[in-house]
Amino acid sequence: MRRVFILSIITILCTFSACVPFGGERNMFHFSTGSGREILWSAMSDIIPDEVVADAPVVYAHEPAAPVFIDHPVATPTPAVVAVVDDEPPVITGARDITLMAGSAVAYSQGVSVSDNMDEAVELAIDAGQVNTSVPGVYELVYSATDNAGNVARVSVNVNVIAIEPEDTQALVAATLSGLINDDMNDEQKARAIFDYVVRRIKYAGNRVYGEPHVEVYLGITNGRGDCYSYAIVSQYLLDEADIPNMMLTRVGGRTRHFWNLVYAREGWYHFDSCPNSDSSSDERFLFDENMALDITARGAGRIPEYYTYDHSLYPAVAGCMVCAGEPVEPVEPVD
């Protein structure tokens, strides 16, 4: 009875936790619970007398089986969602005070752009409701931009509407030139100082409506914006003020117009083009001969094949030119 009772207990235990003999000992059982914990039952010798164990047959709740290893799947952690907060407004660049002649047209967006740290395209809004271009005065112009997060950028500039007279332009040119040259310079050095000033001062902005020359010069110097005509006409006024012989050239042919200058220096006439050109450096466009003009034109043949094409019969012979109206002038080395 005692043997049956003890074995019944073992049977019950094995029923609830897969009982597997451990280490080959009759009095030691390995219980593997469903939770994965392991219990080593080894105290049978203290409960079952030796004579009972010696006489008792080995009883298994079930036939021993090879251990079974169960791979528990490892849950993939869910990436944390980081909320990106956009509290940075767009950036408006290129906005500056504008001077224009009363009654003239103006494009307020020229040279002004907007960018944003998050949004690729942000619209530039222009409020010119306070500006009256017909009446001289100073008016406020407001540029603004709003990104998708609602951040707003605002830049205010002044629009100075004036009535420009030729005398105003001449006074401005004289004052500008006085800060560029001195009496110790020769004509080539003075021309270089004028060239460098125009290159630095004016930023290219195309698609304009041309006004009177003195107006273009005044606006070119004060606003610092213009196209090739602005570069050429400002250069011409400054060269005239410096008493350096010069004249303006106009391109023949092509889809667009181009203006530049001829300047008498180094004992001959040379091309002088202060307008930027991606096919040449500024040094190459200062007092260059006809061969260089042809070379620069060839470089940009894929865009504007007629870049420095002009009517040679209308101008004096340029240094290095074999087809000009006058006698060809050999290039002279520049003066340091």
Image (cartoon, grey):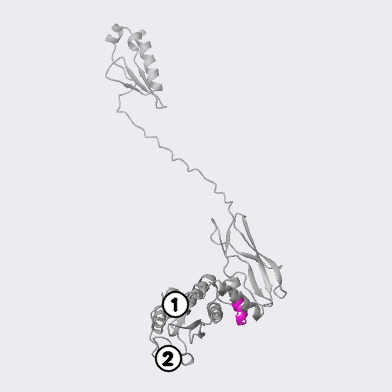
Frontmost residue, 115 versus 67: 115
- The x and y percentages for residue 114 are 57, 62
- The x and y percentages for residue 241 are 56, 80
Residue located at (54% from left, 81% from top): 236
Q: Is residue 336 above or below residue 92?
A: below
The residue that mark 1 highlights is: 285
Does residue 231 show up?
Answer: yes
Give the amino acid type for the residue marked by disc 2 in the picture: Cys
Q: Are marks 2 and 1 in contact (CB under 8 Å)?
A: no
Residue located at (43% from left, 74% from top): 283
Query: Can you tell which quarter of the image residue 203 is in?
Result: bottom right
Does residue 280 show up?
Answer: no
Helix, strand or loop at disc 2? loop
Residue 44 placement, left or right of 277: left
* Mark pair 2, 1: CA separation: 19 Å
Q: Residue furthest right?
A: 135
Residue 294 placement, left or right of 55: right
Frontmost residue, 145 versus 76: 145
Query: Can you tell which quarter of the image residue 14 is in?
Result: top left
Which quadrant is home to the N terminus? Answer: top left
Write down the region rendered in magenta: 209-218
The residue that mark 2 highlights is: 324
- The x and y percentages for residue 102 are 69, 76
